[in-house]
Amino acid sequence: MNGSEHTTGDVLFFFGEKTMELALYETLIERLTQALPEMTARVQKSQISFYGRHLFGAASLPIRRRKDWPERCLVVTVGLARRLDSPRVAVAVEPYPGRWTHHVLIERPDQIDAELIDWLREAYAFAESKR
């Protein structure tokens, strides 16, 4: 990762006792930085944000868990110019015309697959296309 505000201590503090979610995040960030070595990550209070020149995605812990959501998971947020038509998307909202925010729930390392990384690559390209 390039010039990041992403330290091991900050990440450990963010996840606290949630070791399963931490392991999922470590798999995600490893695969994401292989795909986008120029990206940076910033640990914030409610999420770990992924940046190029602009925010393109994030990882977080569920705050308002819905009844049908898994007990333990990592939420991966992806911002795109289009709505994803996938059963993997737990929530999709269009906060601005032509900008869709998607939340994907990750319970297992195998869910951090090529499809998810491709969505994050697309989100990075979409964010980079902004002025």
Image (cartoon, rainbow, N blue to C red):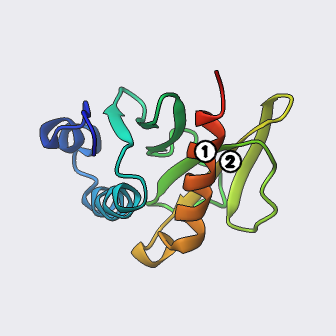
- Residue 66: x percent and y percent? 64, 50
Identify the mark at residue 102; answer none if there is no mark.
2
Pick whichever, 48 or 105, lies toward us. 48
Q: Would residue 81 appear left or right of 72 to someone viewing this image?
A: right
> How many neighbours does mark 1 have within 10 angstroms: few (below 14), some (14-19), or many (20 or more)?
some
- Residue in view at x 20 percent, y 35 percent: 10
Q: Which residue lies furthest to the bottom in this view?
A: 110
Q: Would residue 29 appear left or right of 117 to someone viewing this image?
A: left
- Residue in view at x 48 percent, y 28 percent: 53
Q: What element carries label 2?
A: strand
What's the residue type where badge 1 is placed? Ala
Figure quadrant of residue 109 = bottom left
Mark 2 vs mark 1, foreground winner is 1
Q: Where is 24 relative to 80, above or below? A: below
Q: Where is 88 relative to 51, above or below? A: below
Q: Mark 1 points at which residue?
A: 125
- Residue 70: x percent and y percent? 54, 63
What's the residue type where badge 2 is placed? His
- Residue 114: x percent and y percent? 53, 73
Q: What element carries label 1?
A: helix
Total label count? 2
Mark 2 vs mark 1: which is more N-terminal? 2
Q: Which residue lies furthest to the left in this view?
A: 9
> How many neighbours does mark 2 have within 10 angstroms: few (below 14), some (14-19), or many (20 or more)?
many
Quarter in which the C terminus is drawn: top right
Figure quadrant of residue 49 = top left
Pick whichever, 36 or 92, lies toward us. 36
Q: Residue furthest top?
A: 131
- Residue 119: x percent and y percent? 62, 58
